[in-house]
């Protein structure tokens, strides 16, 4: 059996053993509904509070500012639609960027159909937003600014504190999708001065289908789901107790040794980037060289096609992801790679390899060994590459 190595931690992470163990009793033994008065219910209520405390602590937030959701996408939807509809009387203008996750981008597009006006800011060649562009885009009717903390494709980390400061000065609500940054960055919502922040459990070695929205006290936002009184009447529905318990544990663990985690990932990331770029000609690094997620490697190899590269890598057991097409199987290149100025051809030859807690040096060495000959073989089939190579002689 071939070796199998996982380099897709930005898509999802395996749950930690300790997280699973903590969750298990809540499926059958401690199954009480937290809304019930009896002892079974009270137990559910107390674990809910514990998980909320743990997550609040990792963000330097207050417990009553953490609202559980069904994941990162739901938190993004809630933040954006909830603020838009609650502040309609004040204005209808929203500012975002061209490199958001689809959970933000498609929500903004939906709001445009509902009569809101959205500005999609450009980014520079590294995927960075210019704080002055944010400032200049703010108008009298601007009610919300939503900007991704760290990009899921190219890993670029935005100047969130500066952007939040600008929003605050202008009295505009600021939301950030921190799903990728959470567990990979030290985050302090007070210091950053953000109003809303989305996070998700399955990107930090927790379960899928659970996330949270940080809502700063006093932020004007509509409730998400109407029904029972859960989540302070803002998100009705019996809580996903096992999931929330797992999220609490995963968050706690993610921040226990955050510096070690970051340093380990950065070392492996930079080794991979440097060695691959040295071994493979006509390669570019996408995203910012240093202001980037500790586990993100995103490279474009000219003259090849990302999909065939992924398939070849899969044959030797390497699981990565391509920047060329979205999950729907569409052939449109990634909106993020387009926004940083890549041509369609170069964007199509892109590969994202993301590193996480279970990645070993051996795994990285395996990629450094296997990838260059695969790229070379695929390029031999490219008539364009033959021409360029010939011309260079
Ligand atoms: C994964 C991800 C999401 C979606 O989170 P889910 O929990 O899968 O819904 C949103 N934003 C970013 C940046 C992500 O990486």
Image: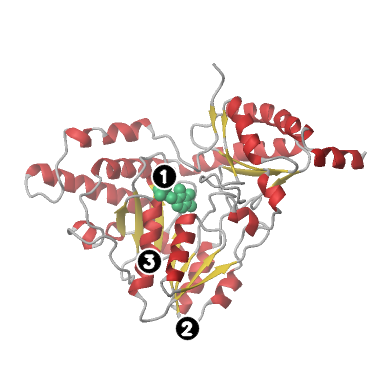
Eye-nearest disc, 2 or 3:
3
- Identify residue for label 1: 255
Numbered badge on residue 127 = none
- Which residue is at 54% across, 47% downward? 326
Please tell me which of labels 1 and 2 falls first in the chain: 2
x, y percent for residue 21: 29, 31
Q: In which quarter of the image is the C terminus?
A: top right
**Residue lying farthest right?**
393
Q: Where is residue 182 in the image (x, y as percent from the top left)?
A: 45, 50
Query: Which residue has dot 2 on it?
Result: 140
Q: In this view, does 38 lie above or below 123?
A: above
How much space separates mark 1 and mark 2, taking CA atoms?
39 Å
**Residue 295, quarter of picture:** top right
Q: Which label lies toward us, 1 or 2? A: 2
Quadrant placement of the N terminus? top right
Residue 373 x, y percent position in the rendering: 73, 28
Q: Real-space Cα distance between discs 1 and 3?
A: 30 Å
Name the secondary structure under disc 3: helix
Q: Camera-side residue: 257 or 51? A: 51
**Which residue matches tag 3?**
81
Q: What percent of the width, then of the height, locates residue 101?
A: 50, 55
Residue 139 in the image: above or below residue 203: below
Q: Which of marks 2 and 3 is nearer the N terminus?
A: 3
Cα gap from disc 2 to disc 3, whole angstroms: 19 Å
Label 1 packing within 10 angstroms: few (<14), some (14-19), many (20+) = many
């Amino acid at each position: 059996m071939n070796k199998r190595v996982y380099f897709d931690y930005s898509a999802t992470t395996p749950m930690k053993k300790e997280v699973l163990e903590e969750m298990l009793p809540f499926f059958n033994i401690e199954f009480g509904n937290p809304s019930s008065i009896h002892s079974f219910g009270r137990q559910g209520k107390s674990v809910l509070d514990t998980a909320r405390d743990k997550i609040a602590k990792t963000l330097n937030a207050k417990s009553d500012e953490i609202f559980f959701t069904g994941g990162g996408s739901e938190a993004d939807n809630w933040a954006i639609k909830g603020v838009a509809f609650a502040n309609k009387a004040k204005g209808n203008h929203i500012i975002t960027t061209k490199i958001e996750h689809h959970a933000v981008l498609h929500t903004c597009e939906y709001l445009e159909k509902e009569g809101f006006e959205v500005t999609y800011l450009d980014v520079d060649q590294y995927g960075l937003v210019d704080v002055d562009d944010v400032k200049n885009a703010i108008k009298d009717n601007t009610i919300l600014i939503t900007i991704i903390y760290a990009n899921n494709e190219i890993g670029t980390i935005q100047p969130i504190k500066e952007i939040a400061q600008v929003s605050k000065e202008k009295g505009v609500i600021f939301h950030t999708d921190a799903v990728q940054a959470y567990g990979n960055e030290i985050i302090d919502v007070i210091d950053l001065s953000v109003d809303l922040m989305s996070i998700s459990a399955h990107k930090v070695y927790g379960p899928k289908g659970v996330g949270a929205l940080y809502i700063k006290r006093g932020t004007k936002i509509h409730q998400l789901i109407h029904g029972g009184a859960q989540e302070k009447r803002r998100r009705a529905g019996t809580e996903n107790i096992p999931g929330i318990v797992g999220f609490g544990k995963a968050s706690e663990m993610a921040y226990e040794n955050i510096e070690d985690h970051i340093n380990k990932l950065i070392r492996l990331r930079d080794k991979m980037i440097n060695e691959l770029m040295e071994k493979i000609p006509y390669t570019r690094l996408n995203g910012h060289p240093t202001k980037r997620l500790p586990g993100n490697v995103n490279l474009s190899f000219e003259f090849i096609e990302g999909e065939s590269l992924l398939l070849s890598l899969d044959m030797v057991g390497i699981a990565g992801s391509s920047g060329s097409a979205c999950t729907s199987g569409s052939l449109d290149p990634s909106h993020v790679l387009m926004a940083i100025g890549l041509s369609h051809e170069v964007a199509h030859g892109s590969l994202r390899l993301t590193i996480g807690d279970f990645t070993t040096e051996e795994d990285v060495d395996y990629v450094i060994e296997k990838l260059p000959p695969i790229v070379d073989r695929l390029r031999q089939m490219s008539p364009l590459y033959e021409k360029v190579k010939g011309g260079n002689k």
